[in-house]
Amino acid sequence: MVSNSYNTNPITIKVSNVTKAFIIGKTRITILDELDFQCYENEFTIISGPSGSGKSTFLAVIGGLTRVDEGHVRVLNHDLNIMDEEALALFRSVYVGFVFQTGHLIDSLTVLENVMLPVELAGKKDLDDKVAELFNLVGLDSSMMDRVPHEFSGGQRQRLGIARALACNPSLIVCDEPISALDVSIQAQIINLLEKLQKSLGLTYLFIAHDLSVVQHISDRVAVMYLGRIVEIANSKELYQSPLHPYTKALLSAVPVPNPVRERERVRIVLKGEVPSPAHPPTGCHFHPRCSIASAECEEFIPPLNTISGTHQVSCLKV
């Protein structure tokens, strides 16, 4: 975890005016809507938001797994827009590590073969010693390398997924809900492991989390998405203590407070209605149908992501 002066660090990810849509039947569904974002070296950035907000598609764009329709994506000084498929495949296997929800292991392969997949895709061979080192790094016994995935617990499988993500020594790790399927006690272990690895290896994390209480102590910055747009982004302490966007306020009102007195006094913000379909998004601010402070202008105008103070940005006409 870096200090809150992270904005002086080199930029690892720069996304400019990115739009990504999918065509289903005759319907165009916009998943990312003119998105702008920057992430800095050695930063632990959390991406949060409701289902359907575009979080996983955003990570796929950053990792070179899907191309954008409009806009520009630059990651680790690589221009992803101009890369052909072969160059993107090499980029994914060498420069970016992926950690998925449940380890995402191939059951027909041994765990050694699973961990070595990125290494083989990068054209390297015979790195059993490297895998043993990775096993030890994530807290697993290297004597288990010849076993198959179903012999491991959920927490162990996620450790294997992290070992595979580190196989080619990437500096950027993208994590798609890597702890949501785990027991609470195991979640803490995995979070502590990721924090330890960041400190020892100088990693940059882009991490999807729906439960902001679990990742509060390790995050440097939090970006909140809603229906394809980032509605608020700030350093972790500022966002948790002083959220500005109405959706962020509602999201954080569900996060438990460790102080029993404050927890009893806290008022939960319950939003009306459901998240609209990305196939038929509202006009103007996408959040306005559920917002208690929305006015007529919110239905008409798309609020820009404005800088309020320091590095705290919010997309709301009422702030």
Image (cartoon, grey):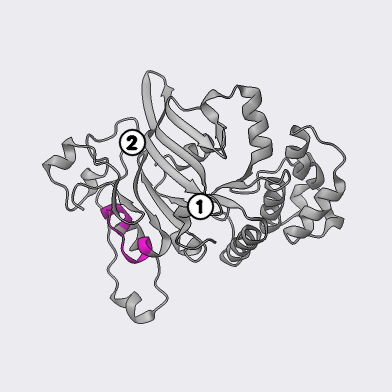
Q: Is residue 90 visible?
A: yes
Between circles 1 and 2, the one closer to the viewer is 1
> Nearest the camera: 169 or 217?
169
Give the residue drawn at x 41%, y 35%.
16
Magenta region includes residue 250: no
111 horizontally vs 285: left or right: right
Above or below: residue 207 compared with residue 14: below
Q: Quadrant of the N terminus?
A: bottom right
* Point 84% across, 56% down: residue: 142
Task: Examine the structure image and report whether residue 244 is included in the region drawn in magenta.
Answer: yes
> What secondary structure is marked by label 1?
loop
Return the mark for residue 42: none
Q: Where 70 falls versus 318 (above or below)?
A: above
Q: Is residue 5 left or right of residue 271?
A: right
Residue furthest bottom as drawn? 261
Q: Position of residue 33 (x, y in %)?
A: 36, 34
Q: Position of residue 30 (x, y in %)?
A: 37, 30
Left or right: 266, with 41 as reference point: left
Query: Could one spot residue 66 in this view of the protein?
Result: no
Prevalent SS, magenta region = helix
Q: Residue at x 39, y 47 (%)?
A: 50
- Residue that mark 2 sits on: 277
Q: Specify start and end residues of the magenta stretch as a single range.
A: 238-248
- Disc number for residue 9: 1
Label 2: element kind: loop
Dividing the picture into quadrants, the one containing residue 192 is bottom right
- Amino acid on which the number 2 mark rests in the picture: Ser
Residue 28 vs residue 126, the one in the foreground: 126
- Among the 4 quarters of the image, the one containing residue 72: top left
